[in-house]
Image (cartoon, grey):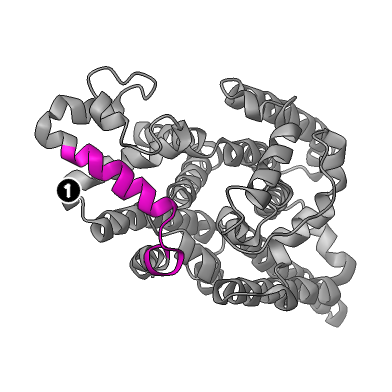
Amino acid sequence: MKIIGALAVGMIYQFYYGGGDTYNYHTWGSRIIWEAFFDSPAKWFKLVFGDNTDATGIYNYSTRILFFYDPSSYAVVRVAGFFDLFTFSAYSATAVLFAVFCFIGVWMLFLTFYHGYPDLHRLLATAIFFIPSVFFWGSGLLKDTLTLGCLGIATFTIHRIFIQRKFRFDLFVLLLVALLGLFKIKIYILLVYLPAIIVWVFLENLDSLKSLVLRIMLFPSVITIATVIAYFAMIKASEDNAKYSINSIAKTAQVTAYDIRYLSGKDAGSGYTLGELDGTFGSMIALAPQAINVSLFRPYLWEVNNPLMLLSSLESVVFLVATLRILFRYNLRIFRVFLQPPIFFSLIFSLTFAFAVGVSTYNFGTLVRYKIPLLPFFALSLILITDYSNRERNVGVLELTE
């Protein structure tokens, strides 16, 4: 499925869009780096691993690379430039290697949840591997493929190190690589991910205590400590990027949303609006319900105006029906399971991320790509909520029978 997705993305960009990001990453990016290798391996090394603010000695190549001075986009070009050495800069083969990297990450994510819920393996596999927009947009030569893979690797290694307490050097290296990848390519994913994963680790370790009374007494302190650590982790992660500092993030959301809606993303699909963003944190928070709704459940069927939007809309309908079914079937019972550590992590990350991309995109064509990291985690939260709620109901029936 990942290979099919990787090849399909290239075809869509080439024959439907007539160009776009994946084309620019390769033809006007890694292909030029590959050509530099035959001129001088030292120049290739500098283009792949060197400082992209210094074009000394590589000026005739850097001026032709479209994203050379855009750090996050050039990180994708670097990876593609490395893979091109093994694929002779064949686009399809390089795209498949991107898909392979992502598959390693999502397989690790599957193993993380399979460890706790082996009886749910088919549903877990569906949520992680087979959501259409995830295996499509998360397989090609794009930022989203790398960041989705990094999310899976980070979740697996954090679970192994801090929850299962398996302290191995290779796990720490993988964790650093994954976090660095998120930091370099899409730092806002890291800013949303860190608070959720830190709270998960604290809750899992709290659950290991045998005394229920002690767990209840320590719970407020654990949440407070985890929140403080997450806050400072966010500050540390964003200190080298002024756009994503705590003080600037609302303004960044406003600028990004209007840029995608009216300028850079105007041809990527249909635009939408949630309300007025004035660059303040208050105006952004006020739009949270609409932002979460647009990321998870829109475009609605009546908002569709092209084939790709139709596919995205049908997927959103499935998520909407599944969510409503759980809400109506289990009613208030679902609130009792929210603090189960894996559910809390999956739900908090997916809803926070839904808010972040929904309020800062304002274009359905772009949103369908930006939101793919949240979809597996939201689907996982629905699966686990259903499983825990069914367990509670079955226990209640047995007790009543006795």
Vertical placement of residue 50 versus 6, above or below:
above
Which residue is depicted at the point 88% across and 45% down?
286
On the image, numbered disc 1 is attached to which residue? 86
Vertical placement of residue 364 versus 245, above or below:
below
Which residue is depicted at the point 48% across and 46% down?
147
State the quadrant of the C terminus: bottom right
Q: Which kind of residue does numbered mark 1 sit on?
A: Phe
Read off the magenta span. 13-35
Q: Quadrant of residue 240?
A: top right
Which residue is depicted at the point 64% across and 75% down?
305
State the quadrant of the N terminus: bottom left
Q: Is residue 41 left or right of residue 174?
A: left
Q: Is residue 296 left or right of residue 29?
A: right
Vertical placement of residue 329 versus 242, above or below:
below
Q: Is residue 15 left or right of residue 42?
A: right
Whether 31 is among the magenta residues is: yes
- Residue 275's spot in the image, x, y percent? 84, 51
Q: Main secondary structure of the magenta part?
A: helix
Q: Residues within 10 Å of mark 1 (few under 14, many from 20)?
A: few
Can residue 94 be seen here? The reply is yes
Q: Nearer the viewer, residue 123 or 55?
A: 55
